[in-house]
Structure formats: C-alpha cells, structure tokens
Image (cartoon, helix red, strand yellow):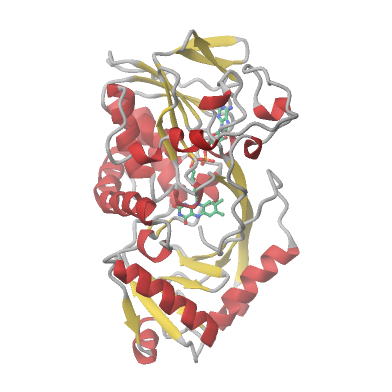
Amino acid sequence: MNGEDISAHRGASGPKVAIIGGGAIGLAIGWRLATAGARVDLFERAEPGRGASWAAAGMLAADLEVEPGEERLHELNRESVQRWSDFAAELEAAAGFDVELRREGTIALALTADEASELRHRGEFQQSLGIDLEWLSGAELRRREPRLAPGIATAAFSPRDLQVNNRRLVAALDTAFRRAGGRLHRQTEISAVAISGSRIGGVVAGQSLHGADAVVLAAGAWSRAIAGIPREALPPVRPIKGQMLALRMNPDAPLIRHVIWAPGVYLVPRRHGSLILGATVEERGFDRALTAGGMLSLLHAAWRVLPDIAELAIEESWTGFRPGSPDDAPILGPSGIDGLVLATGHHRNGILLTPITADEICRCVLSGEPSEIIRPFGIERFRPKTIRQPNMKAPSPNLSPEARGISWHDEVERPLSPPGRGTG
Ligand code: FAD
C-alpha cells in the first residue's frame, strides 16, 4: 500500500484494529488504542488531518452553544470539555509540542434589541441548566475587549468555554499516534469493508485486503461512501459545508483576546496573530466553492462588532465539510456488525468531542460494549424511524449509497435540518 509507515506496532500484542479516516477523530482513537497495546493501522486517503479537522475554528464551546432540545448532547460536550485539559497535557507530552489550548472564555454579543432579546432568552435557558454565564455591563465589556464597536446592546461571558488550535491538534495526534506504535497509511483510500457472515474481516485498499479484528469508521462527512457496509449499519451522515477566512493581526497587539460570538459570525484569535472568522452553514453537498456572498456575510457581520478589521490583510480562506447527522449529535459505538465500530457524525463539535470520543471508542473497541456515556449516541436511535421509499429498488448491500444513487435522507424519516446559526 502507498505511504505505509514502517515503524509498525512496536511490541504490541493486542487486537488488530483498522481505522478508516485520519482526521482528529480517527487519529485520537488510534493514539488511545495504540497506547493501550492494540496493533493499529490507520488509513487516510489523503494527508492526515486535512479534512474538517483542518477547516475547523477549534472552539470548545459546550456552554454557549447549547440550545433547547440539546440537553443530552450538552452533557456529552460538557464532559468532553472537562477532559480537554488533561487530554491536551498528555498529548503535548507525547508529541513534544503544544496545541495552544486557551482558557480566556467566550463572549457573546448582541447589537440590536431583537438580537439582545434572543441572546437573553438563550442565556436564561443556559443558566437554567446550571451553566456559568455572566452578563457584562458596557463598561466591563470595554475593559475586557476595548476594540469592540461602541453601543453593543448586550454581552454574555462564558468562562468555561475553551479554544484549541485544531491544526496543531491534528499534527500532534499524528505524531503521538505513530510514536505509540500506530501504523499510518497515508494516501491510502479504503474502498470497502470486508464482512463475513455478520462479522467484520478487515478493510480493502486497492487490490489488498487488510485483515483486522475490529474496524473503526471515522471517515467524517465521507463515512457513507465505503462499500460493503449493510444499509442498517451505514451511519446517516451528510456533509454540511462551511466557509471561513482568516485575517492577519499584529500578534503583539491582537484586536481581541477572547473568542467572540456575534450574530452571523464568530471571531477566534490565534496566538500567532491569525483572526479566524467563521462560518457559513450550507447544505450543498461536497461543493468546495468559496463564494462572494459567503465571504461578504462573514466580513460584514465581523465588521459590525470589530470595525478595525477593515485594516487587516486577508491571510487565508477555505471551505470544509462538517459530518452532520440528522439530530446534530455524533454517532458512536457498535454498528450492529460484529467488530465494526462507528465514530462519526460529530457535526460542528468534532474538535470539542475529540477527547471523549477517543477514550470511549477505545474502550468500546477493546470491550465490545459502549460505555454509559456514549450509549445514547448509538446508530440504533435512527433505526425505528427507518422508512423505505415505495418506488426504490432494493439496493445491493455491497454498493455505497452514492453508487446506488440514493442519499441518507431516503433512509431516515427526519427531514434535513434547516441551516443553523453561524456556529462551528
Ligand atoms: P475529518 O477531519 O473530515 O476526517 C475524516 C478523514 O477521513 C479525512 O481526512 C478524509 O480524507 C478521510 N477519509 C474519508 N474517506 C476515506 C476513505 N474511504 N479512506 C481513507 N480515508 C478516508 N468543531 C469544533 O469542535 N469546534 C469548532 O470550532 C468547529 N468549527 C468548524 C468549522 C467548520 C467550517 C467546519 C467545517 C467544521 C467545524 N467543526 C468544529 C467540526 C469539526 O471540524 C468536525 O466535527 C471534526 O473535524 C470531524 O472530525 P473527523 O475526524 O470525523 O472528520
């Protein structure tokens, strides 16, 4: 196979595990499994960490993001954020460099009376969940962030939300995974999984079958494009496009220090002077186009709260694909096929959920059972809702849905969720 890392499985004698996908999720699971003594082969069709995990803003905003109906997901997110500090420290020690975990917290802003009433409404709901949220006076806001536009109607500070540099995160995971004895196959696409009876046998790359005791599907927004997975085990994941851009600040005099949320945009300052503006939320399949409208909406929304951005150079712009699921929560744990474990559908929270996904999927692979905390996020939650389109031909289980010409929403009852607010 191409790009094989030959520093293989040093001394490991545990189960043979194949991981499909080298984003933050696949790499972190691989690192945990290799550290626990498993013989891990991770297959990445391009370069590791260049999918959604590269495109993300790295906000770990469990508290400020939660909305009514997301209470259960908030518990998972909250637990993952709590694990972030230890996870980052362990990873930094394993990789030998830091991932820029920052703890300044997040400030949400409203400019108009309508926006203020929405922010108050959401904030009161968040406080009812026990979330630590502080309403800031105008003077207090200016003290914390003096460059913000004058006349901001309302501001709420969420102290427990963190941020991490997600590009450093994936680089650190790549290093830590290989140092733990994991074998990384770059530029190696998995075309299919091999199943015999009701048990996983391995993965297929090119003409080669790579045998494994367990396979973890962590292919992000592309998780449905792998052949051989029976329909009922195929996670209902779809790409949700996000456009973003980065401006260049003077790192010695950054315009802001906190992560700022404003209507239609978030602003994330990085240590070395980048100011990330994100992100659109678009149902456009795998369309990579950067559009004038997308850039304009982000720049305009950011300029309303931080007018000094007008002077900054544009550093970079990009698109990425969140692995969305029908209820915006991840799909974690057993698939129904013995040995095939799912770790996908992390939507706008995959960086935030990396520590808990890595720990709990590692446990699940080694024990065969999902832990209590991930049990509510299994694929079964979509099964009772399965309906079949009356005029659909019965598809061959060996073809991917794309090859069969159907998309996930042919198979689940829920409608596509409407584009959400401009968050991760
Ligand atoms: P990916 O990083 O996409 O990795 C999947 C990998 O699988 C890719 O590298 C791909 O090449 C590989 N692959 C696919 N098919 C195959 C195959 N057949 N064989 C081999 N390899 C394959 N989350 C947060 O927590 N905070 C944020 O602030 C945030 N902001 C975001 C902003 C944007 C614009 C976007 C797009 C996402 C954001 N997210 C954020 C979400 C987060 O990025 C994702 O949830 C997370 O990165 C998903 O990780 P992953 O490893 O599952 O997917």
Residue 253 seen by the camera: no
Q: Is residue 280 left or right of residue 106?
A: right
Q: Where residue 382 sits: x, y (%)?
A: 50, 37
Residue 388 seen by the camera: yes
Residue at the spot x=43%, y=84% of the render?
154
Q: Where residue 304 sits: x, y (%)?
A: 58, 81
Foreground: 54 or 315?
A: 54
Residue at the spot x=41%, y=46% of the render?
169
Q: Is residue 89 left or right of residue 236?
A: left
Residue at the spot x=34%, y=46% of the render?
97
| Numbered marks: total | 0
Q: Is residue 212 above or below residue 243?
A: above
Residue at the spot x=43%, y=42% of the render?
171
Q: Quadrant of residue 414?
A: top right
Foreground: 249 or 73?
A: 73
Q: Is residue 392 left or right of residue 218?
A: right
Q: Is residue 329 above or below residue 180?
A: below
Q: Where residue 75 sits: x, y (%)?
A: 31, 52
Q: Is residue 110 left or right of residue 86?
A: right
The extreme top residue here reads 197
